[in-house]
Image (tube, coloured by chain):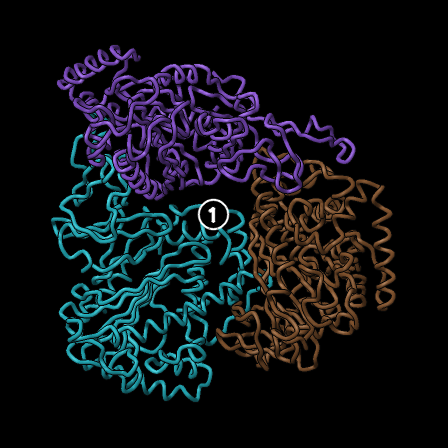
Chain colours: A purple, B cyan, C brown
């Protein structure tokens, strides 16, 4: 799938390669994957500075000149909408002495001007003055360096690789399934920045199973079928009831003109998925009480549309309901620390205080997030111990964690 | 002494081994021993993750299900009393995904349950449910990993090594000499957590001599004979007076049915000691004014029992008086930082406000500790300088520091 | 110039040497020079622990026994005036166990006594007691280790090298040109400690050009001719006006018995300069409004003496006016952090509140400094990105930056 990309892959340290070679599939990753600086460098080189990362939403750069900056493991990028309406991404680094060009996270300008010596670039990245005489280099060689960007139905993903892994299927599927929710004309009702004291893989593994939900997520469990699904996997006598739920949900999805789905968390592609799952019977959306928390999004005409679950390794997931979406963008800070931005989206026309309040919108995911970050920090502390040895995954309830590890190990091995 | 342990020793970096090879006995250690990350890693591997470390007191886990956790250089352990009354230690790491199992420093439970997926262990470490079918591994292979633990008269020591250095003589001697003070039925009147801005060896070297006492420890010097002892070593005309003190003290110890002692700080074994020394004439205990600061401990029937000094490299010392004990547990945080927990023990039956007050109990050791931590931080700053060259130890007053270094170098060389 | 010094040069890591070998003159330095720990170690070894560094002013140790301490990349030094009036520098490290000897930044003592065991040294560094018997080493081998120090007209520079690069011309020129300002009998009116979130080279490169002044230094530009000079370089039709300014300024300097100068920022020697430049027409000094901000310094008899600009790679610059001097001492903290002490000097006889106020004295340089530190931090963030590629320097306005880089690369290559 990413043949071209492989050539561009950074070499990794012998110590990191040895860890990768020792990995036993079906067992949790060994200690160094979570604590070692050379493995963190390998993760950055092979994963974060190569794969497609979520950066933000197209509505965040709604007008020509609107920009958005993002920094991941030292890489600075700027996403900007041009005069032609196209959204482009560039390294946010001046071609003169390397200063950051755009200093704020969100901003607007008719041009992009570096604050240091006012080297000024058009919104398409081209440098606006002649350099040949004074600098000995033609201006055409001194435009902002482009970064590959894809707009998947309003979700913006970028890759820092020259030849990135293929993302065509993922982007097309996400765009198609997101369409009724019209993310490109939503708005961010609220953002929360969390710092999780755990490796980014601990955070993503936590996201890939609901085996931990029963002891930890009282609130989430009232709204989602994940626990029932897992129970049915372990105890086949419960499967018919789960099947009935799916059948009923799919009938509802068909009625609304939406794609069918299931309750699984399996990945669609190797490192992404996008499919609809039911919410709990009697619930119109993922909320504390099952009632709507905002007006309907986009072209959704009736409530009770299930949840469109979208996951893209290594930094993104989103639960998109009829009335709101909750998303998470993961940014590794170091081996034992990850920044997570939580997003709460509502329809652009929704008015705070009238159509929604943060008191009703935030809890179910903010509570669940915080429960997970606590779990993750405790796991990070344990796996950091020399007394930790990789343990076996459940062949029933942790297949998706094993899948994540397999993908990850494959990327480091490749 | 630790033949079996040697096989299990971790390899150390070539840079660390070169420093060890360059060491000149009788001179202070060179700079890298105090600041270099690879030498810190060597210390952890060869010393802290191998030797016997003090973790706490048996009375801290008085009842079945009581537990105590401790973390040293990333290693997480839990010490727990079983239903059978035995105290055991385990890696505090779940055998499933590696989360910490017990989250608080002190706690109680009829079982030990991991918060992540509720893998639950009996107090003897065995896993309580079948894993073969879902996880492909027999439950008998998935118990909490045991850690070696010794109860030396109420003082609990553990070793993370498979084949630890021998500790039999040390444990037996400590248990026998501590017996009259009945540490196993004492209580902690107060704890203070200090962070010392110095390498753990700087802290221990400081503890191994009283050459620094005259200029630095006005309060301690009023209660202890260390300075007189050192003066007698330097000036033999003072020795008879020192001998007379010892003779008188030993008569007193015999009267109380206690072992004889001397004023020295020499080690009994290679890396431990436990012997009684006198306190200053007219002093009943180590206190600011020489008066008792609590009711008598354990089976001690009369005041003025001297001080039982116990030292175990690399992380523990305790001064045990007739009425209270003051101890220190050292935990390395990094090359330039050490956590020290100071403990003040009194008899379990002593009542605060009636039998003792913290205002009278704490000062002599809290003041002395803080004076030492300041000295240590200033030494750390100096030895970190490229302008530092190892200097000569006093052949009279710093033999015990040289002994500590010899032991340490031997462990890194071994 | 520093043949003898070269032998003493520390070896640098292969990674650092490879970066040095890849450097393209006339282009900015590549990323690793600003962020990599092994290159930071190379900088310290080859530059900061070898070259002449500014430490302070002779008037800061005005009387015998006055001392001044300074720490650069772990190296601790003490500068002290002896009973004979001579100023000496030593490693501030006790020859016994390596403690810091002098603990405060400024102090006074008739001797230098280590706080740990009271090893006591005379102000000439010699140890005051016999060590042969107790320590087995003659006291003559245990004096404080000397550090080379030069007093250049009241500015004190030291080198940690055994065979430092030659500094004779620099010291002599600085002493001669500073003479009318009588820095040795000035005083520090104020100091500000800044922490700049940038590599020390970013800070020094910023100091070596005024191409950034137009967009960033509104206040400074009103007082200094730097922008006009650069404009004349780019547009030769402006040169005659600039020449006229210099001609007029030199006439004024001659009238005052001062050396002639020009508006350039070129270096006099390879890594230092000291020459007079005009201030803006109508300005008597570098101030917000052009009026004096203190009484005249030293032997200066009339205002309007231009500015004597002194620069010494890698850690010092000073603008010396008729009434005050503003200086900066750079101390690297890590690859991405530099401590800068800003100094404001006035004549020793000037009285605060009467002859000067801080409200008038500080702004022009404090404002300019803060503008620069902001620029530097933004450049540091940009050059840290893997998307950064070295860009071309202006052949007209950044020759002095290229010169700094050439010097720096030469020192790392040598």
How packed mark 1 is, by other alpha carbons closer than 10 Å (few <14, some 14-19, many 20 or more), is: some
Q: Quadrant of residue A109?
A: top right
- Residue B223 visible somewhere in the drawing: yes
- Relative depth, front residue between B81 and C313: C313
Q: Is residue B297 left or right of residue B263?
A: left
Q: Is residue B193 left or right of residue A32?
A: left
Read off the residue under disc 1.
Answer: B12
Tell me: residue B133, above or below residue B91.
Answer: above
**What is the chain identity of the residue bearing mark 1?**
B
Tell me: residue B2, above or below residue B247.
Answer: above
Give x and y (percent) for residue A325: 33, 27
- Relative depth, front residue between A326 and A398: A326
Q: Quadrant of residue A92?
A: top right
Give x and y (percent) for residue A309: 32, 22
Tell me: residue C9, above or below residue A118.
Answer: below
Q: Is residue A406 left or right of residue C235?
A: left
Q: Residue at x 75, y 70 (%)?
A: C181
Give x and y (percent) for residue C82: 66, 79
Name the secondary structure under disc 1.
loop
Q: Residue at x 26, y 68 (%)?
A: B344
Give x and y (percent) for residue C283: 75, 60
Q: How many marks?
A: 1
- Residue A27 visible somewhere in the drawing: no
């Amino acid at each position: 799938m990413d043949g071209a990309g492989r050539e561009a892959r950074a070499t990794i340290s012998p110590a990191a390669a040895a860890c990768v070679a020792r990995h036993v599939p079906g067992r949790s990753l060994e200690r160094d994957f979570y604590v070692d600086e050379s493995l963190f460098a390998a993760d950055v080189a092979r994963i974060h500075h190569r794969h497609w990362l979520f950066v933000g939403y197209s509505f965040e750069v709604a007008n020509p000149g609107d920009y958005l900056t993002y920094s991941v493991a030292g890489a600075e990028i700027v996403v900007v909408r041009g005069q032609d309406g196209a959204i482009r991404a560039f390294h946010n680094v001046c071609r003169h002495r390397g200063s950051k060009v755009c200093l704020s996270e969100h901003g607007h300008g008719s041009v992009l001007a570096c604050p240091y010596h006012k080297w000024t670039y058009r919104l398409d990245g081209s440098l606006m003055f002649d350099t040949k005489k004074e600098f000995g280099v033609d201006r055409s060689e001194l435009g902002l360096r482009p970064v590959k960007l894809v707009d998947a139905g309003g979700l913006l993903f970028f890759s820092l690789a020259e030849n990135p892994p293929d993302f065509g299927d993922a982007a097309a599927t996400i765009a198609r399934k997101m369409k009724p929710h019209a993310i490109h004309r939503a708005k961010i009702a609220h953002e929360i920045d969390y710092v999780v004291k755990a490796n980014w893989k601990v955070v993503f593994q936590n996201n890939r199973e609901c085996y931990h939900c029963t002891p930890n997520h009282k609130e989430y469990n009232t709204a989602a079928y994940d626990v029932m699904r897992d129970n049915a996997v372990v105890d086949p006598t419960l499967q018919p009831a789960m099947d009935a739920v799916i059948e009923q949900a799919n009938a509802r999805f068909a009625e609304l003109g939406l794609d069918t789905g299931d309750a699984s968390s399996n990945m669609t592609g190797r490192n992404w998925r996008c499919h609809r799952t039911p919410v709990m019977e009697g619930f119109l959306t993922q909320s504390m009480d099952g009632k709507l928390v905002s007006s309907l999004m986009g072209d959704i005409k009736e409530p009770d549309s299930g949840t469109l679950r979208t996951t893209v390794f290594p930094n993104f997931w989103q639960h998109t309901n009829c009335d709101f979406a909750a998303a998470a963008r993961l940014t590794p800070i170091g081996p034992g620390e990850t920044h997570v931005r939580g997003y709460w989206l509502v329809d652009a026309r929704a008015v705070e205080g009238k159509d929604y309040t943060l008191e009703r919108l935030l809890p179910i995911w903010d509570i669940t997030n915080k429960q997970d970050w606590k779990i993750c920090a405790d796991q990070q502390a344990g796996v950091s111990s020399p007394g930790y040895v990789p343990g076996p995954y459940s062949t029933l309830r942790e297949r998706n964690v094993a899948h994540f590890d397999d993908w990850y190990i494959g990327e480091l091995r490749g």
